[in-house]
Image (tube, rainbow, N blue to C red):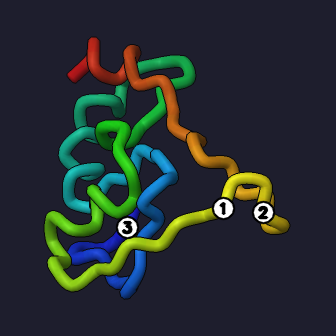
Amino acid sequence: MTEKPFVHKKAFANVKLNFIYHEELANIFIKLINKKGIINLGGPTKTVYNFAKKYNKNVKKFFIKKGSLNKFPLNPFMNLRKLNKII
């Protein structure tokens, strides 16, 4: 989760995640408070850049090169089916 607007100047254009803003998380969390089990919580799967540019039009694209030394995974997104059934 992150602040609104996206505070960074660059965002990954080839990494898909489930970023969500704090205020959106708070609204969803109320519906989950009495549920049991493991529930992945996040926003729709999209690139960090597509998520960021909605509220920060000045964000620039940044690409991670596949096989680069930092070994950052390109698609570390979550399965949100259980969450979507609840909300």
Q: Which residue is mark 2?
A: 68
**Residue 21 x %, y %:** 28, 60
Q: Which residue is mark 1?
A: 65
**Mark 2 crowd level (few <14, some 14–19, many ≥20, 10 Å Cα):** few
**What is the spatial separation of the Cα atoms under label 1 and label 3, in whole angstroms?**
24 Å
Depicted 64 relative to depicted 8: above or below: above
Q: Amino acid at mark 2?
A: Ser
Q: Residue at x 19, y 77 (%)?
A: 56
Q: Amino acid at mark 3?
A: Thr
Query: Quick one: label 1 or label 3, which is nearer the N terminus?
Result: 3
**What is the spatial separation of the Cα atoms under label 1 and label 2, in whole angstroms?**
5 Å
Count of picture labels:
3
**Residue 70 x %, y %:** 79, 67
**Residue 29 x %, y %:** 30, 41
**Of helix, strand and loop, which one carries label 1?**
loop
Q: Which residue is mark 3?
A: 2
**Mark 1 crowd level (few <14, some 14–19, many ≥20, 10 Å Cα):** few
Q: Could you tell me if the residues under marks 1 and 3 are in contact, i.e. CB atoms within 8 Å?
A: no
In the displayed structure, does residue 72 sit left or right of residue 56? Answer: right
Q: Could you tell me if the residues under marks 1 and 2 are in contact, i.e. CB atoms within 8 Å?
A: yes
**Mark 3 crowd level (few <14, some 14–19, many ≥20, 10 Å Cα):** few
Front label number (3 vs 2): 2
Q: Quadrant of residue 28?
A: top left
